[in-house]
Amino acid sequence: MQRPLLALSTMVAAGALATGVLAAPAWSQPHTAPHGISARADAIARAQANVTRHADTFGFGAGQALQVKDVVLDADGTQHVRFERTYRGLPVVGGDFVVHQKADGSLKGSSNARARRVALATVTPAVGAQGTAAGALQRARGLVRAARSTPELIVWAADGTPRLAWRTTVQGLGDKGQPHGEVFVTDASSGAAIENYDTEREATGTGHSEYTGDVPIDTTQQADGSYALIDPVRKHVTRDARNVNASSLNSSSGTLFTDADNVWGDGRKFSADRSTAAVDAHVNTAKTFDYYKATFGRNGIKNDGRGATVFVHVGTKWDNAQWSDACFCMMTGDGDGTTDPEQVDLDTMGHEMTHGVTSATANLRYSGESGGLNEATSDILGTMVEWYANSPVDTPDYLFSDQSTPPWLRRFDKPSLDGASADYWSKTVGRLDVHNSSGVGNHWFYLASEGSGTKTINGVTYNSPTYNGSTVTGIGNKKASAIWYRALTVYMTSTTDYKGARAATLNAAKDLYGATSAEYATVAAAWTAVNVA
């Protein structure tokens, strides 16, 4: 599944940086009542003071500035303030961290990215280094057609060794006319490649034209008496992309779906009625919104009450779906036109929109083990949207995208059954495609939820093994997902790996259930069972 990294669009240009609030707080689960603007501002001020007072802890020094990205205020007064940093006006990639402090503002701990103290001799790049390296990487990866190339000077610190680098974003079209882009990071002195990755998050599936049966659908009546697919509660809009082959979709692209009698679609596979796919997209977007709000008190993807734009019929015979931070939208294609219809089923929609939640919080980098955790987060919480909806048409299970890719695209009890995903952590996991390295996180989630061994749940038989032959007793997926969400929004940072995810979830379990609880013990046992110690 696809989505551009939020870091590409939220980094502020040189000379325009100032300490400030970038996003509304993601109130911690299970307590969801906001603490007010004054409490939030006070937490930020105290966190800034703690960073200054404990500069060595955070690697903070001359030339650096902080930006507030998120604030979580617990019911007991504990505060978690997430910062990104800049150096001499340049974004520091991998320099994000979370300040954890007590109700009185004293420092409780930190969740640090891998940046050390930044002290560069110069922020002037070598002439020609960016163009040569980025151009070579672009040709090697082979965009179908590059629409634009945007270079940005950054401080690269994701590997713990800060240095000046170029981050070049190339936007173009894929082989099915879908929006496609790649990011190339190159050393600003030598031009040597540091890394490159897709700006979208992709997984191929097979869609069906009608997934949800006969359902109520929230619309808005227009001045002329017609009805539009504008959700008046959640503020999201569903539009027909009209099969445009463009990488620059925005909230006004395509055509808004309207109807005279407020009856939409015909429920048929490969339907000639273009609104049939829109029904599933519109309803499943609403279910995802409702899941996050009812479960975690999160009011929209960025926790700012803002609804997304949902596009159906994107590209020509594009058999995929993706989330894009660039246009704050979901995009779904029409399948191959022969066997694969639209990909707008519930857990797929939940998966894609969760990429947006990840971007707005930990912003897990889409490469290496952090990329696997990014995909696992979307699989886990996207699947929990299905459990939340509890539809008789789409029975909850641990089979991701089973409706659009029968029998399933990925499964949780033994991920390797897809022929490519990892059941357990090893030193080579970070080299896998992120959709396959996600297997370690997905397997952990199943074991933490349901335990090991053979069992039948909602008519599906699972048989989950463990790396060490241990027996794990599950705590249920509601508790396991609550622990994962808190770990994501409070403890994980952009470069968190699987070892870091173990620490983050244990901290989350301790916060929610206590360090001596059965839940805490199960979290630890499940990680050990997937070989993460």
Image: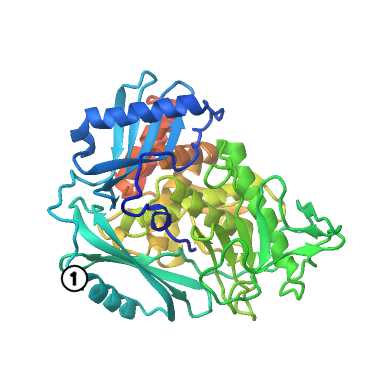
Q: Position of residue 531 (x, y in %)?
A: 31, 48
Nearest the viewer among 312 and 390 is: 312
Q: Is residue 333 above or below residue 6?
A: below
Number of marks drawn: 1
Q: Position of residue 452 (x, y in %)?
A: 45, 45
Q: Residues within 10 Å of mark 1 (few under 14, many from 20)?
A: few
Q: In the rendered view, does 412 fall on the left or right side of 219?
A: left
Identified at 24% across, 37% down, the residue is 58
Q: Which residue matches tag 1? A: 127
Q: In the rendered view, does 333 fall on the left or right side of 438?
A: right
Residue type highlighted by circle 1 = Val
Q: In the rendered view, does 368 fall on the left or right side of 358?
A: left
| Residue 178 appears in the figure | yes
Colouring style: rainbow
Nearest the viewer among 49 and 313 is: 49
| Residue 401 appears in the figure | no
Identified at 52% across, 46% down, the residue is 302
The secondary element bearing badge 1 is classed as: loop
Q: Is residue 403 above or below residue 519?
A: below
Q: In the rendered view, does 79 fall on the left or right side of 220?
A: left
